[in-house]
Image (tube, helix red, strand yellow):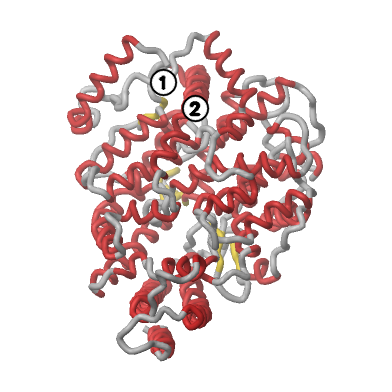
Amino acid sequence: MSGQTTSVSAILFLLAVSVAGTPSTDETAAIAWLERYNTEAQDVYYRRSTAFWAYNTNITDETQQRQVEVSLETSQFIKEIAQNATALWDWSGMSFDTKRKFDSITNIGSAALQDQTKLERLTNIQSDMRRIYSTAKVCETVDGQENCMDFEPDLTRELATGRDYDRLQFIWDGWRASAGPSLRPLYQEFVSLSNEAAQANGYADTGASWRSSYEVDTFEQDLENIYEELKPLYLNLHAYVRRKLRETYGTRVGLTDPIPAHLFGNMWSQQWNNIFDLVEPYPNKPGGIDVTPKMVELNYNATHMFRVSEEFFTSLGLGAMPDTFWERSMIVRPTDGREVVCYASAWDFSRDRDFRIKQCTDVTMEDLLTVHHEMGHIQYFIQYADQPLIYRGGANPGFHEAVGDVLALSVATPKHLKQIGLLDEVTEDPDADINFLMATALEKIAFLPFGYLIDQWRWRVFDGTIGSDNYNAEWWRLRTKYQGIKPPSTRDETLFDPGCKFHIPNNTPYIRYFVSFVVQFQFHEALCKEAGHTGPLHTCDIYRSTAAGDKLKAMLQMGESQPWPDAMEAITGQRSMTASSLLKYFQPLTDWLKQKNWENRERLGWDAETWQDAKDPATSFARALRTTLPVMLLALMAAMFFRC
């Protein structure tokens, strides 16, 4: 392993400061040691990022093997640094800053595995899972010729624009048949090894390790409280959308049932904005804006979309992208036949202000907003680039996800789209406002239960509550319980539907997105106030407000140097997450939905936490039904006496 000798020799150099046998309490010497660590670590993580980038932008056996090798080298570096930090220093009596740095570098993730064979196996499993997901295709025979479709853009476009029930089901089923089954045994093995690493770090399991990033003992309960606060709005949106889908698909959508999962214009039913045309409140009014046709008319391409996003950030007084960003990023799918990981992501190479984005950009409004999301990550990287490497991260993982989305809340307003030439006129009309808020809710409110449940499933997998013989059943129990959706076809335990969402095989914690979708509205309200906005919150556009930019910059530059409540206070004046700003933003739509659902005498919610397959009620997922029968009976009894 070519990089291992370098990192080990550097560690031996660092050992020279030790006092034989006794951890030192000399904070001045400890700070000097941390500074030398910072220099060496930047080189180590740069090599790692370079190898991972090479694989993600050119999936071959060679790049996969190099990625694994460098990952193992990095793990060895991390492990030896942590061991030597513990041996060399007693930081219990040192300053907050020094203790925080040492606590960070001794919490070493999967590198804590002492058995090298197990560490190598865990690393290879993660690499294999990413490859299976990223190279999966759905194939069909057309006119005697096999036609294979990539996830992006082929499958995503079909789901977004298609309205044929059976064709949508073919795409939905095909993706899960292609990506899921091969991942299942790997994921089961991954869980065991990942938990072993977490326990070596002092955590009960991997889920506990992930939750520790939020530094709040009441984190799970805080999330539950926020979810319950938002649930009535989601139930009203769900009931309204269900009736509209009934109008399109007839009795295949029951008015008191969970909604078939393939009808939302999205592979995971996580956001519903692609079916706005089916659910638009006032079809003859503007407001539900999709500027994709205008972007095409104006000959937008991927570079133009990223330049538009960059200009929004610079209008706030924030940093422009370095030249290397434009030279090294991959913002379109390559046309030279390479297999790549298309899922959009932002990269900090840890050195030389090397920041990049990897995205197979399509010229759509949805991707324009995704561009702003990813550019938000890059702006965070730029602003905290002068922090030590240890502190180059979001105040908590949800903050990092929220930054670009905060700007996207402004970008999506009719006022802003007109300013940048993507909308010809803006109409002052309450009906148009409802259309706009509906379009936004299909993206933001529809996502909330999905963002909440993914890690509910994983945390329970990691702590053993959900066993490997019940992965799919429990996945769909949670999807139905929280989202009110059901699969359009029979599912069983030969499948692995959770693995068909990128973040599962990529092992990316997901609760950060739920946190982001809450705190971005807190940030938005605070920045709108700083910008001097008056009027409804959903009409605010902070474009060109350097006052708002200064407020945002102050928080971004903190990085991870302080607990997140301090960063929250810096931008909002509050020290906790709250749904109040989100509810304020959507209040006009909430009132409208309640009135519309009352007029239609809608039943909010759905009949049970599980489902019966429409094609074969007698055999659909019999095992899951047996497992959850007591829950079903209780839910059905409750339905007789209670209307949400």
Q: Residue 197: image x %, image y %?
A: 29, 64
Q: Eyeballing the image, is 485 above or below 308?
A: above
The residue that mark 1 highlights is 605
Q: Eyeballing the image, is 576 above or below 606?
A: below
The residue that mark 2 highlights is 234
Instruction: Check disc 1 and report its element: helix, strand or loop.
Output: loop
Q: Quadrant of the N terminus?
A: bottom left
Residue at 38% in and 43% down = 174
Q: Amino acid at mark 2?
A: Tyr
Mark-to-mark CA distance, 1 and 2: 9 Å
Q: Horizontally, is 477 left or right of 428 in the view?
A: left
Q: Eyeballing the image, is 180 above or below 634?
A: below
Residue at 77% in and 37% down = 533
Residue 130 in view here: yes
Instruction: Check disc 2 and report its element: helix, strand or loop.
Output: helix
Which numbered marker is on residue 281?
none
Q: Horizontally, is 437 left or right of 131 in the view?
A: right
Give the crowd class for mark 2: few <14, some 14-19, many >=20 residues within 10 Å.
many
Q: How many marks?
A: 2
- Report which quarter residue 12 is drawn in: bottom left
